[in-house]
Image (spheres, grey):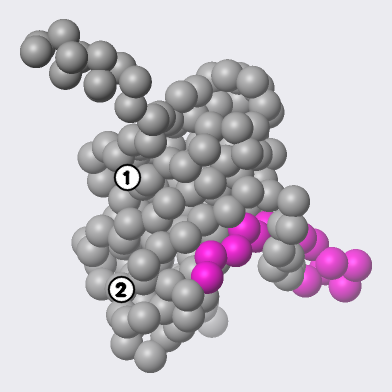
Amino acid sequence: LMLGGILALAMAPTLAVAAPGGAKAGAITIEGASVRAVPEGRKVTAGYFKLINKGPADTLIGATSPVAEVIELHTHQKMPDGVMRMRRLEKGIEAPANSEVVLAPGGLHLMLFGLKGPITAGQVVPITLSFSKAGQVKIEAVAAAAPAKPAHAH
């Protein structure tokens, strides 16, 4: 009976959930997952994490969460007029073989649209990431307050 339980665990799919902020599936590890806390009435927030790929090249192709209607993969791009604008990444976010890819403010990130309520600091937000090879990885992103804007010196 013990052997059957061990075999069942060994044959389980590579879908994993770890402590808030991190998860692992196959060669993909997610660390430091977070989203920005937003008040009632705001319908959009951003998500960030470090993606560590210790295997062959893979691509983050999508994400879902019960707290949002849709999640898009985005980056910031400097336009010819010098203004930074967000751009949706239709083909996903590449994770080259044996690499680390950081999703952070001002660069690659998740955009959660159609929020179903406020997200408070410290709240854990479940997100399922979909990879072209590794499959699905369930993460728990911890909500953090947006950084305070610096005061202007006069």
Looking at numbered disc 1 in the image, what kind of residue is underneath it? Answer: Gly
Looking at the rendered structure, the secondary structure element under dot 2 is loop
Q: Is residue 151 visible?
A: no
Q: Position of residue 106 (x, y in %)?
A: 61, 58
Q: Which residue is mark 2?
A: 119
Could you say where residue 135 lies in the image, as x and y percent from the top left?
A: 52, 38
Q: Which of the 4 image quadrants contains residue 38?
A: bottom left
The reply to whether residue 98 is visible in this rendering is yes
Determine the residue positioned at 48% across, 48% down.
129
Q: If the image is split into quadrants, where does the C terminus sit?
A: bottom right
| Magenta residues, start to end | 70-83
Of the image marks 1 and 2, the number of the one nearer the N terminus: 1
- What amino acid type is highlighted by mark number 2? Ile
The image position of residue 49, as x and y in percent, is 46, 46
- The residue at 61%/25% (across/down) is 99
Q: The N terminus lies in which quarter of the figure? A: top left
